[in-house]
């Protein structure tokens, strides 16, 4: 399995996942031109992509969806409940509704609900052979009933949106601070670290910190906060940060 973040943050999100025989994107929150450019850096074209999975319909996750839907031959997987929000830009024949488990070649993609101020939002558990990826962004918390399902996976692509002290002392208006901190907001460094401490295990090789706020977080601080909890376990996964304007390294597991 190969993973690369093309962009991660409040201005746009898109990630590339490659399995044995299928290649997918998660979210299309950047321009179609930028998606093509990022694929070219992998010696790929849009014709090589088999499917796009959408977590939710906030602009930073679907800004490039309309143009992509016009030009790309791939199938677009979304929650059935949000199709009405995008049907004006997404022809029905391009759409597959996300079921609890989708199988693409040797890869299985299971969805699970996240808690965000969107009509529907979800994360993904992607598994193939002995490798697995937990993909979680844009959530105020992870429902307890899904935690055991997400334990001891190979890679965690995990939201560390903000540092709580930076947010509260920053320039955001009070209502926005409350939104970010709320149950339907975003995971802080501290909360993400506590989840990851519980979730990681012997199989875990990589943690990718994602969706960092450019105003209320700092890469070094996010890594330090997560590392302080991870070091309380006996596991030592590699930790990287997915950036807004720079593609991540290509992670292979």
Image (cartoon, rainbow, N blue to C red):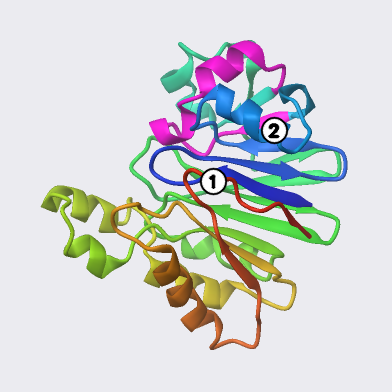
Residue 51 as seen in the image, left or right of residue 105: left
Q: Which residue is mark 2?
A: 39
Would you identify the image quadrant in which residue 15 lies?
A: top right
Give the class, few, some or many, for how many residues have Cα within 10 Å of label 1's Cα (few <14, many ≥20).
few
Task: In the rendered structure, find residue 230 and report the number of the disc placed on it.
Answer: none
Q: Which residue shows up at 49% across the image and 43% down it?
A: 245
Q: 17 or 181, which lies in front?
A: 17
Q: Tag 2, which secondary structure?
A: helix
Q: How many marks?
A: 2
Q: Which residue shows up at 64% across the image and 29% down it?
A: 37
Q: Which residue is mark 1?
A: 246
Can you say whether 83 is above or below 207 in the image?
above
- Quadrant where the image shows the C terminus: bottom right
First of labels 2, 1 by sequence position = 2
Give the class, few, some or many, for how many residues have Cα within 10 Å of label 2's Cα (few <14, many ≥20).
some
Q: Residue furthest left?
A: 174
Residue 180 position within the rendered picture, expressed as x and y whole percent measured from the top left: 28, 53
Can you say whether 95 is above or below 88 in the image?
below
Residue 130 position within the rendered picture, expressed as x and y whole percent measured from the top left: 83, 61
Q: CA distance from mark 2 to mark 1?
A: 13 Å
Residue 229 position within the rendered picture, expressed as x and y whole percent measured from the top left: 49, 81
Q: Is residue 61 highlighted in magenta?
A: yes
Q: Tag 1, which secondary structure?
A: loop
Residue 105 as seen in the image, left or right of residue 141: right
- Span colored in magenta: 51-74
Can you say whether 13 is above or below 188 in the image?
above
Q: Which residue shows up at 12% across the image and 53% down it?
A: 174
Residue 236 position within the rendered picture, expressed as x and y whole percent measured from the top left: 65, 80
């Amino acid at each position: 399995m190969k993973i690369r973040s093309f962009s991660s943050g409040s201005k746009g999100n898109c990630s590339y996942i490659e399995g044995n025989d299928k290649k997918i994107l998660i979210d299309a929150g950047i321009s179609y031109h930028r998606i093509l450019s990022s694929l070219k850096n992998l010696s790929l074209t849009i014709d090589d992509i088999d499917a796009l999975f959408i977590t939710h319909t906030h602009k930073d996750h679907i800004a490039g969806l309309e143009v992509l839907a016009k030009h790309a031959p791939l199938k677009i997987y979304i929650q059935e409940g949000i199709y009405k929000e995008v049907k004006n830009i997404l022809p029905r024949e391009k759409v597959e509704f996300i079921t609890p488990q989708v199988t693409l070649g040797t890869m299985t993609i299971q969805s699970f609900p996240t808690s965000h101020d969107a009509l529907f939002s979800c994360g993904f558990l992607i598994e193939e052979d002995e490798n697995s990826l937990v993909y979680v962004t844009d959530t105020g918390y992870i429902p307890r009933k899904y935690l055991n399902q997400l334990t001891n996976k190979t890679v965690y692509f995990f939201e560390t949106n903000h540092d709580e002290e930076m947010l509260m002392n920053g320039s955001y208006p009070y209502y926005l601070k409350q939104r970010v901190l709320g149950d339907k907001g975003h995971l802080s460094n501290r909360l993400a670290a506590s989840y990851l401490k519980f979730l990681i295990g012997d199989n875990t090789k990589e943690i990718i910190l994602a969706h960092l706020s450019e105003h209320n977080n700092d890469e070094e601080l996010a890594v330090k906060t997560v590392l302080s909890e991870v070091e309380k376990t006996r596991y030592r996964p590699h930790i990287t940060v997915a950036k807004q304007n720079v593609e991540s390294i290509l992670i292979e597991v």
